[in-house]
Amino acid sequence: MSGRVKLILASGSPRRLQLLQQAGIEPDTLCPVDADETPHKKEAPRTLAKRLAREKAELAMEKAQRLPELQGSLILAADTVVALGRRVLPKAEMLDQASNCLRLLSGRSHRVYTGITLVTPKGALRQRLVETRVRFKRLSREEIEAYLASGEWRGKAGGYAIQGLAGSFVVKLVGSYTNVVGLPLQETVALLVGEGYPVHFNWVNRA
């Protein structure tokens, strides 16, 4: 579609890209950014998710402003936080981190927050925060060990990927499933449509 505004996804996450593509949206550019994801002292998980999404969007905007072909683009950024109460669980990179996360989540409910920030072509920020409640069954030692051996946990907030093997751990989910995967589609699409992005253009004659 000629003349439409460009869309930059400020993420290198394959999951976020796949979710956008699921909704028929193909970003023009991927712009991964490196933000410090360390929580501030006493920072609530929901506040952390919103702050990091905003910071990622602002970092991507700084990059885009240096490239004439990307100036005036829409910029979409998101950050997902898994929390037990006010305790933020890490994006597991080490085996012991993932093991600790799974043991904490076993048999308990937790919350998943995703902050979304959309930068408009005029530089305004549009933000949303989405919350989903998830309850895990009680995990046996064998289940935890097998999941750790799969390696699926690596780089995942809370040490698990709901769209993969860990989907079998979920007893109850209240809210957006795509939020837990990493990008709540309903809210994301609503933000884009609200700024005039032609989300539904590619839906026609898709079959």
Image (cartoon, helix red, strand yellow):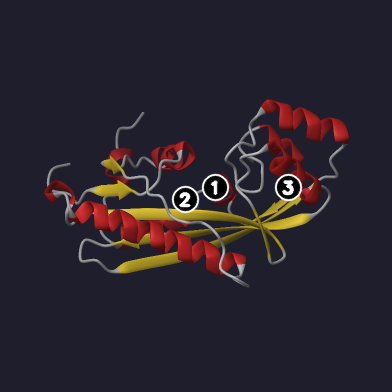
Looking at the picture, how far across and down is residue 9, in whole percent?
34, 47
Left/right of residue 107 with respect to residue 77 in the rendered view = right
Looking at the picture, how far across and down is residue 176, in whole percent?
58, 53
Looking at the picture, how far across and down is residue 183, in whole percent?
49, 50
Helix, strand or loop under label 1: helix
Which mark is first along the chain, 2 or 1? 1
The answer to whether marks 2 and 3 mark residues whose Cβ atoms lie closer than 8 Å is: no
Helix, strand or loop under label 2: helix
| Disc 3 from disc 1: Cα separation | 21 Å
Which mark is first along the chain, 1 or 3? 3
Residue at 54%, 61% in the rendered image: 130
Q: Specify the amino acid type for callout 1.
A: Thr
> Dot 3 corresponds to which residue?
101
The answer to whether marks 1 and 2 mark residues whose Cβ atoms lie closer than 8 Å is: yes
> Dot 1 corresponds to which residue?
178
> Dot 2 corresponds to which residue?
185
